[in-house]
Image (tube, rainbow, N blue to C red):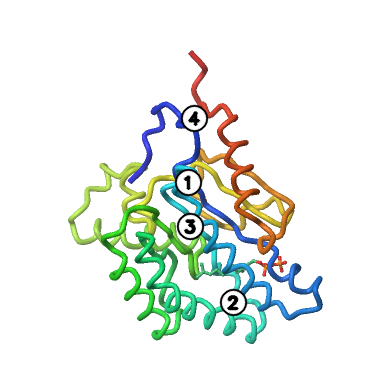
Amino acid sequence: MSTDKTETPTQGPRHVAVIMDGNGRWAQSRGQPRLFGHHAGVKRVKEIVRACPDYGVKYMTVFAFSTENWRRTQAEVSGLMKLFRRYIQSEARDLLAERVRVRFIGDRVKLDPKLCRVMDEIELLTSRNDRVHLTVALNYGGRDEVARATKRLAKEVAAGRLDPETVDETTLARFLDTCFLPDPDLVIRTSGEARISNFLLWQSAYAEYDFVDTLWPDFTVAEFAKVLGAFSARDRRFGAVPA
Ligand code: FPP
């Protein structure tokens, strides 16, 4: 699904995507191991997701683990994988009660089958929810996603089910991991870095960006509200000239 680029901008963003950066630095500045920061980061995810309906945010997409994050130490990678599994299992009941629909994007091939099982379970368990749509990007990379989508599309062409002459932007979008999501209106990155790090490359073509200095474990709902307020003041023209 793609948002209609001509529709009148709403007050606030409907879909917010977040690059939750700064967990490691936050922990290290406290003399703690990096995983301590990731645990603190999970708390912020919970708070922000819970606050979404208050601010009209229907879709929240968070970058939990990138295709490049495998380059971290084995201890950090396995600690993060354990954290994801624990978060999914321990939060299942609350997410269901709060009517949050959880889905994952990214390539599951490299993920532990036990983790994949709990991911499938929570997707199924929450599949009827629609108060907030939480999408977790796990082993996700924008270029990797486009490459995988292209491969699937090419297979359809090779099988004679898709006429290459009909392929346009919307066709490719249907093959992306995010085919069930509207494009993000706002992408937030915490921790003072001004990069997009391979996150939602295709989908963010018209997104507004906000880079904030706060480290993710310090990113409160109040600060989230401030960023949403700043978004509402922006003039989104999607390439058009104001009437
Ligand atoms: C980036 O900070 C953060 C990550 C790579 C992990 C983010 C994951 C979470 C907050 C857990 C969320 C879990 C779920 C299931 C939603 P960094 O480690 O790169 O920080 P640094 O730049 O200070 O080193």
Label 3 to label 1, Cα distance in Å?
Answer: 8 Å
Residue 54: mark in rendering: 1
What residue does disc 2 label?
70
> Residue 69, position in %: x, y?
60, 72
Q: Residue furthest top?
A: 243
Q: Are marks 2 and 4 in contact (CB under 8 Å)?
A: no
Q: Could you tell me which residue is drawn at 42 percent across and 26 percent down? A: 8
Lower sequence index among marks 3 and 4: 3
Q: Could you tell me which residue is drawn at 39 percent across and 73 percent down? A: 92
Q: Nearer the viewer, mark 3 or mark 4?
A: 3
> Residue 239, position in %: x, y?
51, 27
Q: Which amino acid type corresponds to the residue marked 3 in the rendered image?
A: Arg
Residue 50: mark in rendering: 3
Asked if the beta carbon under badge 4 is closer than 8 A to the nearest atom of ligand 1, the reply is no
| Res 148 quadrant in image | bottom left
What residue does disc 4 label?
238
